[in-house]
Image: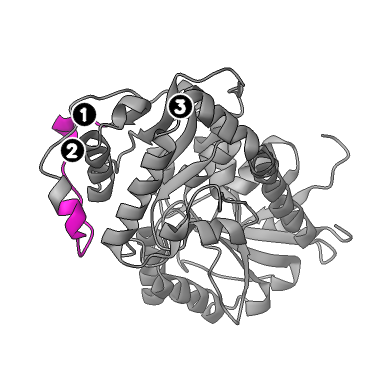
Amino acid sequence: MTGLKKLKVVFDNFDDKGPLPNLNDSIYFNNWYKISHFNEREHGFFTIPSALMKMWKENRVEFVKKESLTPNDRAIYPIQFYSNEAADYFCYFASTGFGPRKPFFHYEDSEKISHVLICLGWEPITEGSFSNIKNILISNGVPKEKLVFLVNNPFWEDKEVKIVVGTNHETSCLSILSGHKINNLPKEKKFCILNNSANSNYDFRQATINALEKRNLLKYADYSHQSVEKISYVTDKPIPSVFSKLLGNRVKETKLFNESIENNSYFSLVLEAYYNSFFAGKLYITEKSLRPMWWKKPFIVVGQLNTLKALQKMGYKTFHPFIDESYDYEDDLDKRFIKIMIEVEKLCSKSLDELQEFNSKIKHILEHNHKHFETRIKSVENYLLGLTNENI
């Protein structure tokens, strides 16, 4: 990729292993590409934004030390908050003046820094934390017109700073799935469910699995979830009554996570990160809703209110009228779940041949979503490149 424009990314310090952001108290740059333990990124307050890491691997990012910048240079200063907890720690330490480095954040040479890029990373950030981050940075000398926030929620709005809907989750999916090939062979199962993550013990996830078993629908699915010995329910508040009725039994069978199950079925039932907004605070889209796009599959989402509306706002297409998606704007938690189950049952009532034909009818939607997946990534990358390069 030689000859492409590069994004200049500035840090305060370098050590012998690579750039070290001044805000990073425990995570060294080399951890991203020299070790494989995901938690190494999670344990610190700040991490290198994934969008920048993808571009760096493609030789489209130039890391520079701040003191080496000239008045003619344009560079961005990046910060990524992995979680709401990291954001709250930042605000606490910054407001008290304490931290592993003093001052905890010191903005200087502002004429050399085009923008300060704030990535709200892999977990939901509440409105309060968002406001605190913004206000702390502005009070420490960052001009508000130079603040750019990359967020996961397409409904974030703020009058003072630039907000861009980022592609953290698309980038993550692409890095995981790009080595797997989509096949057009006949499928053995009607649908699949991936529920083997650390939070597969959420009440709505287990209730969904149990509801499918009660309706004798799991026989049509490839699915994964944690072994029952590890499940300790995390309950949303208030727990929908329909869930409490379903959580008495636990599905015994456990299947290990395997990418091939995506290729072995005609649609996906997505168990999102949240069902109600109690944990997330606002709507939060994760890679779970994006995976079927890459696999060119239709999907139904067990998730928060307006999840499909959010995906549409990001440029993806969903499946109305082929699937009744009125569940997406049903604010009654019990009724939403019942509507979702009805749509799953409708699709499961079709034979494998009928489902193959169904997917052929909506091929234009499936192809659009697959292409838009990478289009969005490129769009965000071009936006970032434009922050330090003219005429992009």
Observer-nearest of 366 and 217: 217
Q: Secondary structure at mark 3?
A: loop
Relative to residue 165, is residue 108 depicted above or below? below
The residue tagged 2 is: 231
CA distance separating discs 2 and 1: 7 Å
Q: To which quarter of the image does residue 118 belong?
A: bottom right
Q: In which image quadrant can residue 151 be found? A: bottom right
The residue pinned by badge 1 equals 227
Q: Return the residue nearer the eye: 213 or 314.
A: 213
Q: Is residue 42 magenta?
A: no
Residue 72, above or below 185 = below
Q: Residue at x 73, y 52 (%)?
A: 379
Q: Amino acid at mark 3?
A: Ser
The dominant secondary structure in magenta is loop
Range shown magenta? 226-244
**Residue 287 at x, y = what percent?**
49, 44
Q: Can you say which quadrant of the picture contains the N terminus?
A: top right
Q: Which residue is mark 3?
A: 351
Q: Mark 1 or 3 closer to N-term?
A: 1
Q: Where 239 sits versus 157, above or below?
A: above
Q: Are marks 2 and 1 in contact (CB under 8 Å)?
A: yes
Image coordinates for residue 354, horizontal then vertical, percent: 52, 29
The image shows residue 286 at horizontal and vertical percentages of 47, 49
Q: Observer-nearest residue: 54 or 366?
A: 366
